[in-house]
Amino acid sequence: MIRGNHINLYGVLLTVLLLFVHTNLWAVTEIYVETAGTLQSLLTSTEQELKVTGVINGSDIKYIRQLVTVGTVKKLDWSGVRIVSGGQALFISGTARSL
């Protein structure tokens, strides 16, 4: 009976470990942007999951879009950003639009 409980405990621990590895919880790049338009210079490398906080503008959004488009970033959390005007224009459906 005791041996059976140890096997179940090992099974649960192994399952939890595999979930952590699979979801890649440790591989989150977190970046704080103090000055809008500087995200690209602050972000020297990134994991597949990116969390951005601070102030961003059109240049930063354009850079984030590039990272997502090529598949470098697969999960983006920018719930902590404030978007301000300025920066590069975004090209949407062949037309330039400024923020």
Image (tube, rainbow, N blue to C red):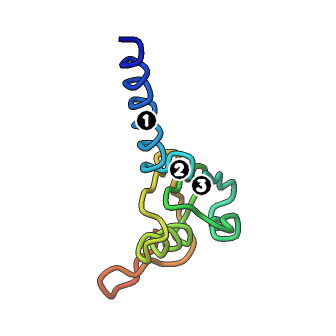
Local SS, label 2: strand
Of badges 3 and 2, the one in the foreground is 3
Q: Earlier in the sequence, mark 3 or mark 2?
A: 3
Q: Earlier in the sequence, mark 2 or mark 1?
A: 1
* Residue at x-position 63% and y-position 65%: 39
* Residue matched to label 1: 16
* Residue matched to label 3: 29
Amino acid at dot 2: Val
Of badges 2 and 1, the one in the foreground is 1
Is 76 displayed left or right of 34 in the figure? left
Farthest residue, direction left: 93
Q: CA distance from mark 3 to mark 2?
A: 15 Å
Q: CA distance from mark 3 to mark 1?
A: 22 Å
Where is 27 relative to 60, above or below?
A: above
Q: Percent position (x, y) of residue 82?
A: 53, 51
Which of 22/85 is in front?
22
Local SS, label 1: helix
Farthest residue, direction bottom: 94
Where is 92 relative to 22, above or below?
A: below
Density class for disc 2 (Cα within 10 Å; few <14, some 14-19, many ≥20) is some
Amino acid at dot 1: Val
Where is 3 relative to 20, above or below?
A: above
Q: Earlier in the sequence, mark 3 or mark 1?
A: 1
Q: CA distance from mark 2 to mark 1?
A: 32 Å
Density class for disc 1 (Cα within 10 Å; few <14, some 14-19, many ≥20) is few
Which of 82/44 is in front?
44
* Residue matched to label 2: 81
Amino acid at dot 3: Thr
